[in-house]
Amino acid sequence: MELLSGNEAIAQGAWEAGARIGVAYPGTPSTETMEAFAQKDDVYAEWCPNEKVAVEVGVGASAAGARVLATMKHVGVNVAADPLFTAAYTGVNGGFVILAADDPGMHSSQNEQDSRFYALAARIPIFEPADSAEARTFTKMAFDASERFDLPFLIRSTVRISHAKTPVETGPREQVALKPYEKDPAKWVMMPAFAKPRRLSLDARIATVQEWVESCPCNTETIRDTSIGIICAGASSRYVADALPHASVLKLGITWPVPANLIKSFADKVERVYVIDEASEYLSMQVRALGIPVSDPVHPLPKNGELTPGTIVHAFGRQLPDHEQPQTDLPGRPPALCAGCPHRLVFKELASARCIITGDIGCYTLGALPPLSAMDTTVDMGASISMAHGFEIALAGTEHRPVVGIIGDSTFGHSGLSSLLNTAYNKGAGTICILDNRTTAMTGHQGNPFNGITLQHRPSREMDLEGLVRALGIEDVRTVDPNDRTAVRTAIAETTGAEDELSVIVFRSPCVLLRDSFKLHAPYTVTDACVSCGACASLGCPALSCDGTTSAVIDAEMCVGCGHCAQYCGFGAIQQREEGK
Amino acid sequence: MAASMNSTAQAVPYSDGALTVLLAGVGGQGTILAADLLARTAIANGMQVKLSEIHGMAQRGGSVTTVVRLGKQVNSMVADEGSADYILSFETTEALRAIPFLRKGGLLLVNDESIKPLPVLTGKASMPANAQKRLLAYGAHLIPASRLAREAGTVKCANVVLLGALAAGMDFPAESWEDQIRLKVPPKTIDINIAAFRSGMACIEPA
């Protein structure tokens, strides 16, 4: 028995099922799945620039006869939606299973969308495990079912499945040979003449799946007190087990297509049916669509955020345990850019230049928070560049503040490149800052095309970022050290001053957490010359404090010696210590 | 003093009878390793375990909590207010933040150190007044984890000192914890980590 996270268990299940190919773009809470899969024997796994590419590589590998695992976070499914919808039409050759990891509660995401609506819309069956043991078993079942029904299968996890560790009994790998590939345009060429019959085939395949889910062992019915019947799935089902131990429960392991007859027969056995679901009305919509009335608990369940056993106990009108009230005088502890983060000065200077700053997804989104407060927008991967263009064309001909898009290296590779192609093609203006910290930092330092590090450390090469940008016909392309205040300020002033031109500044310096390439220097300290002006604290470095009344203080343990703060001290009061660290 | 594994009368909302341990701290402090060692020790003693943690953005210096639930049977992997049998906090402000989760009679173990969050560093907010005194009023045991870790060999093993304090309040044999530490930490640091664990254990009277 092993203690595995849900992500590790999905990787284990895929490996045991004989999957030989893994494709993904990292994204919390899905990332560790492909990292774990990549370390297994006899598999090929790669990071792709984005989820659409990953799913397309997966469709190709499946067509060629291999069992394939693709993993992504919920918003990654949006990016992959195009191939996904049509992959339901084509079906598979080798089994194809796709993990969609949702983030109810938005611990590390920009929205709280529910991937089960994709299953419904694309007509791709979806498994929903409730712990790591089920994550492994359901993944294996999904591979078999994928080949049996000629459909890709989805697995939906949430943070409390992906990032919860629970015991798992593991097994050996099934030896699955590559299935022969035979040319079959009627199955694989989705032009109207072939897609129309394939649409009918999809209906027929789904009809057989609907029959199969009625008796699939992943759904479990437990009849106890028949006055309350709960329908639930995933993590919520475990909370129900705690909060309502006497209730009758139908726990669904497949949430599209739902087992209609099983649900109807369960509803007949109980007086009232309740649906307990997290941050979504998906499941209650499915039950209501069967003509089954769904009762409301005494207090409504929250419509957003995560559930706990306590929220369910409360909803059913029972007492919660006594507890102390929250303390009212505690300072918040928001996440922050690390001490020495190479992004910090860029945000400081952009804010000083009073730019309109369209931001993007990554660690650097933290530049939006005080005291830097240097971001106007964040929507999705790549939007910094396209939204900057939107601002520019809307404000053209008016007096406006300079518009600057800011994006990380991995995010640029993900979808910023096509946005920049658009701006260049349409002769747009503005300044694009690419923060190249040599890694995909927020999700835990994965490789990407611009650092040339591949998932299984196969030889690759660093893509020429500046060369790529120049190839779009953009003439003003600069490479700047983001740790040099003067250089940063000059580059921003010059590029934002050229109003009708499109400029790209590549700020290149390694992430402070990359201990192999980030160079640690002796820490800095504050001398008696400090006048407590607070200029240094406006950088928001967690190693430096200055409340505006007493001298600034630098935490020598935390300081990495980047010297950013010293460049903002007008009194020469921040000096580097002599000893090394 | 300690919440006992055999006699705990579980309040709602949990009916699985499992113990709930909440580890609170600041992203990057090593709560995840401590939680992992706790989970593995419980498994080695024949218990079921669920451990839930948060990755991603919060790891950049934000408030983080890790929950470990252990018992003969475990359903939920999250903690509710008023339900934690143990809170092990790596920092005083985060301990105060976690107070609502402590059940009546639960054990509160707190590293005696404070880490200022960014709003305090920039002068926009203040640290809570008399944090240690308030924690003591809630029955907290304050552990000088960094000092003890330094004495053991490196400040980096403060998390293992805190784990030792937790171990003193639980029913697993000390050898069982130490076995898991030996399996999990880098070989060169085993002696330092065992010393750190024992010094944390010595802070708390046995259960």
Image (cartoon, coloured by chain):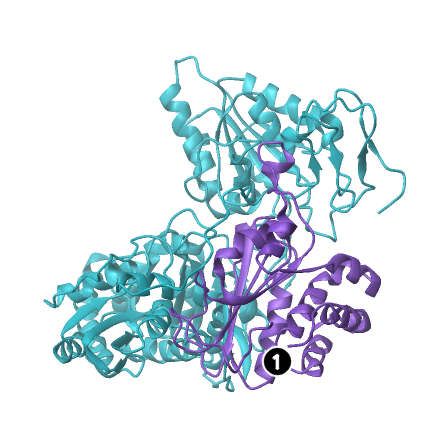
Foreground of the two, A427 or A50: A50
Q: Quadrant of residue A200?
A: bottom left
**Tag 1: Cα neighbours inside 10 Å, few (<14), some, or many (≥20)?**
some
Q: Is residue A331 above or below residue A60?
A: above
Q: The chain shown in purple is which?
A: B
Q: Is residue B1 above or below residue A314?
A: below
**Left-right relation of A500 to A75:** right
Q: Quadrant of residue B55?
A: bottom right
Q: Is residue A535 above or below residue A385?
A: above
**Left-right relation of A206 to A240:** left
**Left-right relation of A93 to A374:** left
Q: The chain shown in cyan is which?
A: A
Q: Is residue A511 above or below residue A271?
A: above
- Residue extending furthest toward the left: A291
Q: Chain of mark 1?
A: B
Residue B201 locus on image (x, y percent): 72, 71
* Amino acid at pointer 1: Asp
Image quadrant in which the N terminus of chain A is located: bottom right
Foreground of the two, A53 or A249: A249
Residue sitting at 40 percent across and 26 percent down?
A391
Residue A330 locus on image (x, y percent): 54, 43
Residue A24 locus on image (x, y percent): 48, 60
Foreground of the two, B72 or A221: B72
- Residue A439 in view, yes or no: no
The residue at which mark 1 appears reads as B171
Element type where label 1 sits in the image: loop
Residue sitting at 60 percent across and 64 percent down?
B32
